Amino acid sequence: MTTETTAKDIMHSLGTQAKQAAATLRMADTRRKDTALALAAALLREQQDEIIAANDLDMQAGKKSGLDAAMLDRLALNDTRIEAMAEGLEQIAQLPDPVGEISELSYRPSGIQVGHMRVPLGVIGMIYESRPNVTADAAALCLKSGNAVILRGGSEAIHSNRAIAACLRQAMRDAGLPQDAVQLVDSTDRALVGELIRAEAFVDVIIPRGGRSLIERIANEARVPVIKHLDGICHVYVDAAADLDMAVNIAVNAKMHRTGVCNAMETLLVHAAVAEVFVPQVVAALTAAGASIRGCPRSCALAVGIESASDADWDTEYLDAILSLRIVDDLDAAIAHIAKHSSGHTESIISGDYAAGQRFLREVDSASVMWNASTRFADGFEYGLGAEIGISTDRLHVRGPVGLLGLTTQKWIVLGHGEIRT
């Protein structure tokens, strides 16, 4: 596939099939959708060896092409990660089906009842890099919410994505649902990305997951609405009233539990009142865990092993075992720093002070705001969504981890008894 015409033809075919499948899937009952999810989970487990073998091909190619450690970590599959994918599908099957839900019914003076019904968005275009688990998560969430999905994974994960998508399509067939509700763009030609984000005749929303350059390109060029986040510059603020042992544990977890993910802490803010005691403790713990720290002048004076931070560090998503550290004078200064440098993803305050915690929750304007918890919890699985198709830092039409509700919309419904308008 080398010409623009060919790319258009392929996307036209995928789009037509997805549109037809979506029309059928939106009418599917919950039992049939849940059966497909259960079958897909079983197939992932049964074909685990084949999936790992396919992933090994991607890992070998990734190492040869020079993918960095964070990208390779996202790409890698093992028994544990495949089991997590299967469990995610089963959890989605157990969630309430939002499609067809009627809410807010009320009588009007005319006698009619007016309310909302929740309905699928239609066809989702999913563009993502590295993580093969997104293939399963996205397809499962779209299936349960009644949407068809066109999956365009990165070239670095093509073998893994093919193996996972095959399980999902077989499960759809076995459950009596249209297999074209889950379609993988089985080509690494980049022209297809451009066609997908311009396919407004077929696609109702685009959800990109990947590096900033990919998401910026899609946001700038798409003719289809986009649900996105660009960066995960997440903050943890240790307040004057913090339990310092708790704060150390949370800081280490938020940074080092998994470094190459968007909900990992990138900047640690520390109240000046506890900095002299806390900074040496947390630096020792983070260093022992393998982290490199870039600090402000005040923090550098309190512990050895901290490099001087540049202005750019406060606006950097490292996706690595690196963090920035700044001492702030008070809660106001912490909130101001976050307002200036955050990407709007996730922030956390560590504090035993009720008023400080409440202020932080109210005033910090991010998709997820936490109190005495690791930023690593900003995740659809941890929020009880079963899995997530992405995280949005936009305000319309969904914010934070995007699960089933985020993949639906509402339409007005009116129930009458023969009323006419006079």
Image (cartoon, grey):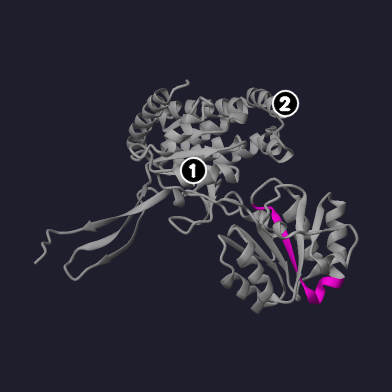
Image location (x, y in percent) of residue 220: 47, 46
Give left or right: position of 38 versus 280. left
Residue at (67, 52) in percent of width and height: 317
Q: Is residue 312 magenta?
A: no
Mark 1–mark 2 Cα distance, whole angstroms, equals: 27 Å
Picture quadrant of residue 362: bottom right
Q: Nearer the viewer, residue 37 or 364?
A: 364
Residue that mark 1 sits on: 218
Give left or right: position of 265 versus 343. right
Q: Of label 1 and label 2, which has the lower sequence position?
A: 2
Residue that mark 2 sits on: 64
Image location (x, y in percent) of residue 318: 71, 50
> Mark 1 belongs to which amino acid?
Ile
Residue lying furthest top: 1
Q: Which of the image's four quarters has the C terminus? A: bottom left
Q: Is residue 264 magenta?
A: yes
Image location (x, y in percent) of residue 40: 53, 32
